[in-house]
Image (spheres, grey):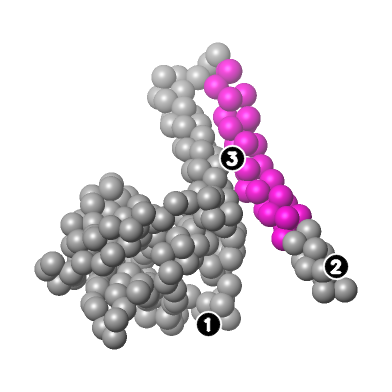
Amino acid sequence: LDEMTTQARLDKVKADLVANVSHELRTPLAAMAALLETLEAKDLTADQRAHFETRLRSQHGRMQALVEDLLSLSRLEGRQVTVQQESVDLGPLVQEVFASIAPLAAPAQVSLLAEIPAGLRVRTDRNLLEMALKNLVYNGIRYNRKEGSVPVRAEAAGGELLLDVIDTGEGIPAPHLDRIFERFYRVEPHRSREKGGTGLGLSIVKHSVMQLGGQVGVQSAVGSGTRFRIRLP
């Protein structure tokens, strides 16, 4: 009976994943089809054509990001990632994450703040930690307020590294906090899609941190921003 229950649960997870992926891909595919049809019109001005081509590239990028995130999550969940431990200096790592994501922060008028003690190091897999941090900082930008900030703080305490990614945005209502690390879970689906993203970022964070032998948690209140905390051994 237990085996049947487990198999039924796995079948439901697979069915839900297929349904979610199909739904997420359908939107950009439909938009691309409509844009291609529009671009076939012969009476478009140069400015109109450039506008529709920009929108087409945006939808293509959205679909590509979804596929890449799905592949990353699949490897993490299937434990197909080799964890390579090395001594990582957190300050330079956070600055690299900021540099890679700065083009998104500037238009949103969000400040990225590194508050990392000099020389603070952790023995971990650099790539997995960078992946988790990028997704958390990206979320901090997307759901922030204008002229807000995303501080990243770290400290060593009790044999653990505590790494916080904070935003000064709108916050997350309490009923959603237990589910935000699920694949494709969105607090406000329509608004979340408008802001971009694949709905997989926090799930990638969770599984990346798990591969590192750590945990990730969240504290938030509506109107007071959000803090994600990564705990690593």
132 and 165: which is toward the camera: 132
Residue placed under numbered mark 3 in the picture = 28
Q: Which comes sooner in the sequence, label 1 or label 2? A: 2
| Rendering coords of residue 215 (x, y %) | 44, 73
107 and 152: which is toward the camera: 152
Q: Quick check: is 25 in the magenta stretch?
A: yes
Q: Residue at x 78, y 59 (%)?
A: 11
Q: Which comes sooner in the sequence, label 1 or label 3? A: 3
Residue placed under numbered mark 2 in the picture = 4
| Rendering coords of residue 161 (x, y %) | 29, 75
14 and 199: which is toward the camera: 14
Q: Which comes sooner in the sequence, label 3 or label 2? A: 2
Residue type at mark 1: give it. Answer: Ala
Q: Main secondary structure of the magenta part?
A: helix
Residue placed under numbered mark 1 in the picture = 174
Apparent side of residue 66 relative to residue 221 in the rendered image (left or right): right
